[in-house]
Amino acid sequence: MFDRLNAYRIMWVMVFFDLPTETRAERKAASLFRKNLIKDGFTMFQYSIYVRHCPSKENADVHTKRVKSFLPDTGYVVLFSITDKQFGMMELYNKAKPANRPDTPQQLELF
């Protein structure tokens, strides 16, 4: 039987962005973009990097499409998807000391 929670099937969608904040309108657009990311289940990884855990490539595609629907008019945004296995190989440091990884959401599947 195929393992549905395989580390190569589970995906992480990462959103990297650099948005202008010089005018009030730009700050408002940047804030709205971050709020929309959070509303769609993304969590802050670093100040301008948000991540979302997705159970499959198909689910990651849904969230990627959703982010594209609320892209701001100015600035740079990068959407990047990687497998759970790749995400797990990431090395994180805080002040040259190893840091903890973000928690992987526990998923309950009822079927």
Image: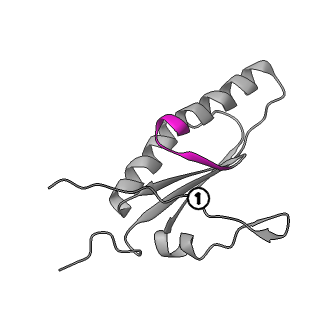
Query: Could you tell me residue 16's position as x and y percent?
Result: 66, 52
The amino acid marked with disc number 1 is Pro
What residue is at 55 percent from the left and 69 percent from the top? Answer: 87
Q: Is residue 111 left or right of residue 92?
A: left
What residue is at 48 percent from the left and 60 percent from the top? Answer: 104
Residue at image mark 1: 102
Task: Locate the C terminus by quadrant.
Answer: bottom left
What residue is at 34 percent from the left and 56 percent from the top? Answer: 107
- Answer above or below: position of 39 versus 50: above
* Nearer-the-camera pick, 6 or 100: 100
- Answer above or below: position of 26 versus 90: above
Task: Tell me the crowding category of disc 1: few under 14, some 14 to 19, or many 20 or more residues within 10 angstroms, Cα based.
Answer: few
Q: Quadrant of residue 90?
A: bottom right
> Total label count?
1
Tell me the magenta residue range: 37-45
* Nearer-the-camera pick, 89 or 68: 89
User: Circle 1 sits in a helix, a strand or a loop, which is it?
Assistant: loop
Q: Is residue 105 left or right of residue 2?
A: right
Q: Is residue 84 left or right of residue 45?
A: left
Residue at the bottom extreme of this rendering:
1
What residue is at 85 percent from the left and 63 percent from the top? Answer: 95
Query: Could you tell me residue 68's position as x and y percent?
Result: 51, 43
Q: Is residue 42 magenta?
A: yes
